[in-house]
Image (spheres, rainbow, N blue to C red):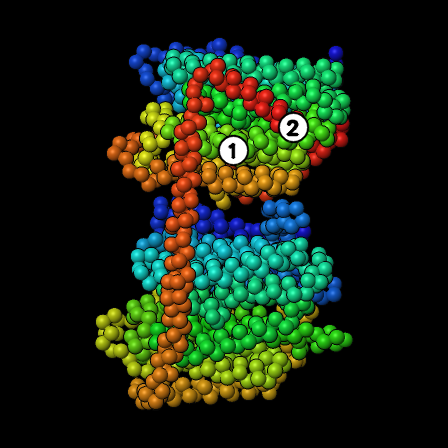
Amino acid sequence: MDYSQFLHMPEEASLLAVILILFLADLFMCKEPKDGETISQKPSAINVVAIGLLSIHTLINLLPCCNGCMQATEAFGGMYQHTPMMTVIKSVLNIGTLVVFLMANSWLRRPENIVKQGEFYLVTLFTLLGMYFMISSGHFLMFFIGLELASVPMAALVAYDKYRYESAEAGAKFILLALFSSALLVYGLSLIYGATGTLYYSSVGALFSGDTLLSVIGLTFFLSGMGFKISLVPFHLWTADTYQGAPTVVTAYLSVISKSSAAFVLFTVLVKAFAGDSLMAEWNTGLYWIIIASITLANIFAIQQQNLKRFMAFSAISQAGYIVLGIMGGTAQGMTSIVFYILVYMVANLGAFAVINVIEQNSGKIRIDDYDGLYETNPHLSFIMTLCLFSLAGIPPFAGMFSKFFIFMAAFNAGYHWLVLIALINTVLSLYYYLLIVKAMYIKKNEHPIAQFQSDGYTRAALVICTTGVVVLGIGGVFYNYIDTLSYGIDKMLGAL
Amino acid sequence: METQFLYTILILALPFCSFLFLGLFGHKLSHKVAGLIGTTSLGLVFLLSLYTAFEYFFGIGRNVQGIYQALVPYNTTWLPLGNLHFDMGILLDPIAVMMLIVISTVSFMVHIYSFGYMHGERGFQRYYAFLSLFTMSMLGLVVATNIFQMYLFWELVGVSSYLLIGFFYTEKPAIAASKKAFIVTRFADLFFLIGILIYGYYAQTFSFSFVETGSVREFASAAFMLPTALFLMFIGGAGKSAMFPLHIWLPDAMEGPTPVSALIHAATMVVAGVYQVARMFPLWIAYAPDTLHIVAWVGAFTAFYAAAVACAQSDIKRVLAFSTISQIAFMMVALGVCMPLPNGASPELIDHEFGIGYMASMFHLFTHAMFKATLFLCAGCLIHAVHSNEMSAMGGMRKYMPITHWTFLIACLAISGIPPFSGFFSKDEILEASFAYSPVMGWVMTGIAAMTAFYMFRLYYGIFWGTENKEHHAECHPHESPLAMTFPLLFLTAITLVAGFIPFGKIISADGLAYDFLAHFNWALGAKSCFIALISIGLATWIYKGEKQPIADKMQNAAPHLHRWAFKRFYLDEVYQFITHRIIFKYISATIAKFDRKYIDGFFNFLAWGTHELGFQIRGFQSGSIQKYAFIFFLGALALLLVMIL
């Protein structure tokens, strides 16, 4: 075996190094809470190490984005593929994970978590590694390993607050349904193997020129499995329960990082392995209805919610619908707009979750009507929350408006005019429920508002990153153009077929 | 891209940074520090603009043929839309560089002046933040590389003007005036936007580099659409530049602080419309020369109307406001009277007969900005001294405020067109262009120039000579203003003294070629206009200089209606009030509102109720039972399969 092939995967290698160092560090740095100590104010060593290492990893991976020396490579006989666009999406995921780590701090410092802080970092990074492999896979087996590596530890994360009934329940639900969906997905893969005799994307794509029933069933099960990961209707039912039960930080991670990576992979795999004309028409039809159902139903449910995390779950489902909108047609423009959308969605959603989390940690309140009159006591947090919600709703001049604009443009240019119209109408609907929260914070009066508090430094750093993102990405074009220069990657993928 | 001019980005970045800094942290700073930050950044912008101008006009601006070329030091695509794209960048050409000088000079002077004028006001830091925002937007407007960028900054300028007019937001008239200004200009901007969209649709570009893109030639096939687009853009420009009948916001805008009036409503923002027409001028002259007549006559009527109203106002800032409207209309006329070159004519002709209006307009823009800013800043000093805008509270002020008196006098002479002050030269060019267009236009404009001299000296005598309001003066002890306020007056007056001798024709002309202005100077016309101006001034002196003013009273008694009509601005505001409130609001809006409340709201309430009920009904899906979830999951997969197969 040619070991030099590992050099083609510097991002995975660097992340693995981070994981191994953390593994060792955790052995020596973990410490028991002293009796009577409630919330430790001092940053513990493992926090600093984890955040520091991940920052270094993020920066190292950003370097090739900045100096532009990125190339498409292959390793291990095409099992592992890599394009510049993948570097970008991995960097986006890195930044998101970093923000999650920052906001996790106030939660991890609770006495019941202080012993197992290191585990949180390790398990999270393992899922991230799984996503890396999933993104860079060139073979369905590799893809499946990545998928499982990204979802099994996720169940552990969801059940992290195991002393809490809801968290344990959410974990159980998540793992059971994840297994169910994986089983279905593997069954679909086996059908594909049966039909073509290979699991390489490129070969599958070449052999799937027409649509046999077998290939369509395979495609369906693949779509269902991915629909579960991205939480698209009708595979979304786990979402609300899991989001509500899981620790808020994990919910944030689930709703952004996990979802975004899966959406990106869905795009690349569909374009590579199911690119035959008739198959393409089929998955476009399937996605068409999935998108309409996701956006519309999620909006209807979101209006009803009283629990903020449940609310964010439905908001995330409808946002997923918008992300998948960029897949329609499988164009290079769609690829660019998806990556840009993910970036923008990430900062806005993580910002909102950071606020929810810090409020939950400080006051234990999570219902929307608890937020009444928040502006009176915590004006800065309310302001940031408002910015993030505006961005999620797509109000100019914040970043969300531009990302929605680009994704609509892509779908419109691909010829899906009615779909774009329905999505637009739903944008207006979503405005209503996002503004409900803004109204609660600014206008509604409350006898017992959430008390004023000072958020910790880590959370503030996370909030600064997210707010800057929401505002700065609003100048849109610059970043979009940069990503656009890379999306020839997709044409290359197509060219390789 | 010309990288040696890359530093011009700083011209925009500096005021923007100072706006952000003062806006976010201003309340933590003392007045002095906040003012110093704003003024320093503007000082740097001023120096950078001068340096840019020097480099451009004496350095690399000229190409080998001696034509000033348009340089684009920086350009980036902001929003790509397929073929069309919205760019953001910096364009340097003679008129843009000239505007940089005008804006940075006046803005810098106003920054200094405000130290004295706004001393101790509440919200001092906010004031400087807004000034920075305005300056940034205005600079961005003039260096725009494409019409869409211009529009964006155009709106920003409108917003900052709104914020500054309503700066004293506790006073009712200020709020009403700011709203009026914003709504009227915004109404006009709607047409501007439509014009831009039509233009973009047909020309497939927003860029100002008409020649290089070559798309304009294709555009000519849509022969009707281009003049329409240009005319719609002109309506937007007429709103900002206060052309009749969209001028009604400008007199009210005088409710803002006086330095703001000097900066925004005399020197910079109000000439944006003129600048816009000048910017699109190659298109106007090539494809819409007939529409250009409309520009000329709208301008001429506005000039006359505003001059007539100015003769009867008693509030000194209102007189200046109407005078501004009238002068801007002069610039519009100058652009409007340009004519396309007849076929086969030699290129020399364009300089002399056909393109002179373009140059005259820009020249007048420059000189007017300087002397009108001086006049407004003088008015600020006077208001500061007697705490009133009314002429009746003044009179005899020359004894108390010598510097203000002399600078005001020089500015008055300049605006009246007396040599050797700058206004004489620029106004003379405009008259010459008007006579070349048609003798009627020429004589009309000469008449208005005479009216200008008359009302300006009426104002001058009313303030500095005339009947002194001794009781009021005993009460408020008028005195000369501090140095922070007098220095800008002296500086701008110095420019007014020498600006006439700048060989403007060498710098700015319709085709970029230098043309010698002295060689073409029409001495007879100059003498004539100077003579008429002197007569008007003499007339004003005869009527208004004395302690008692029997002739003025007699005139007022002889034609009381005319005076009252002019004083009430020919009841135009009342007409607007009547049309909007009595007709549009009462009959059209009220009906629509009723329909809206009953049917539209009803429909949406129904929708909301429906969604709510639906959500309630389908809550069963979200039961929490995991077996059910898996079952629905599987059904979903089957449904998906069906959808895809069928």
Amino acid identity at mark 1: Ile
Q: Which of B319 and B522 is in front in this view?
A: B319
Residue B131 visible in rendering: no
- The x and y percentages for residue A377 are 31, 35
Q: Which residue is drawn at 45% across and 20% down?
A: A242
Residue at the outermost front position = B646
Crowding near pointer 1: few (<14 within 10 Å), some, many (20+)? many
Q: Nearer the viewer, residue A89 or A171?
A: A171
Count of numbered circles in the view: 2
Q: Which of marks 2 and 1 is in front?
A: 2
Question: Element at badge 1?
Answer: helix
Residue A293, x across and y down, in percent: 53, 31
Say which residue label 2 marks: B646
User: What quarter of the picture does the N terminus of chain A occupy?
Assistant: top right
- Left or right of residue A439: residue B51: right
Which of B567 and B635 lies nearest the eye of the viewer?
B635
Judged from the image, the secondary structure of the residue bearing numbered disc 2 is loop
Chain letter belonging to callout 1: A
As drawn, the label of residue A295 is: 1
Query: What x and y, as percent, mark residue B467?
Result: 29, 82
Q: Is A47 in front, or is B303?
A: B303
Q: Which chain carries label 2?
A: B
